[in-house]
Amino acid sequence: MNPSPINWLLSLMLLFVASEAGILVHKVDLLIYNDLQNGTFLTIHCKSKQDDLGVHLLAYRDYFEVKFRPNMFGTTLFYCSMQWDATRHWFDIYTSERDTCTYCSWNVRPDGPCLMESDKSKNSTTCYHWN
């Protein structure tokens, strides 16, 4: 016996409502701090496949914040170009495969960005070096 098209439609609607309500996919709050030496400005330009978040100029200890929901397929990717003085780098600032944080706080340092994990089970820092 084949399910009726109405049952399929109701199932899809329920899945959509559940994902939009955050039941299936958590919301992410992503912050990027300028942790270069005092007086050094950081220019960042972040994008995903669907969204261009624009260019932002951050003074020392200023931050840029974006809130989003990763897609339910686990393929969400945000990448940023980061430039200061004569230095320029690209970094995948959020990938669903690597990042499990709901509050992702990144400090951009001269040797690479550092993810500051501060949930109840961890209080650690993971730093990545530029390629």
Image (tube, rainbow, N blue to C red):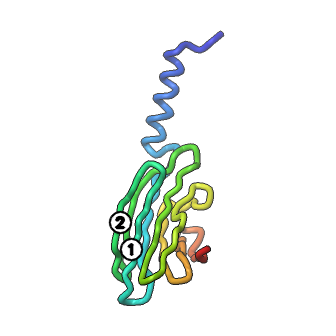
Instruction: Tell me the element at label 2.
Output: strand
Q: Is residue 118 above or below residue 49?
A: below
Q: Are marks 1 and 2 in contact (CB under 8 Å)?
A: yes
The quarter of the picture where residue 42 lies is bottom left
Q: CA distance from mark 1 to mark 2?
A: 7 Å
Residue reaching furthest to the front: 86
**Residue at the disc numbered 1:** 43
Report the residue at 59% width, 14% height from top.
3
| First in residue order: circle 1 vs circle 2 | 1
Q: Is residue 37 left or right of residue 7?
A: left
Q: Quadrant of the C terminus?
A: bottom right
Q: Is residue 57 left or right of residue 1?
A: left
The quarter of the picture where residue 40 lies is bottom left
Q: Position of residue 6 (x, y in %)?
A: 49, 16
Q: Quadrant of the N terminus?
A: top right
> Hey, what amino acid is under mark 2?
Val
Q: Is residue 114 above or below residue 67?
A: below
Q: Position of residue 109 (x, y in %)?
A: 50, 81
Q: Is residue 92 left or right of residue 42?
A: right
Report the residue at 57% width, 61% height from top.
99
Q: Front-most of 66 and 52? A: 52
Q: Residues within 10 Å of mark 2 (few under 14, many from 20)?
A: some
Q: Residues within 10 Å of mark 1 (few under 14, many from 20)?
A: some
**Residue at the disc numbered 2:** 55
> Hey, what amino acid is under mark 1?
Thr
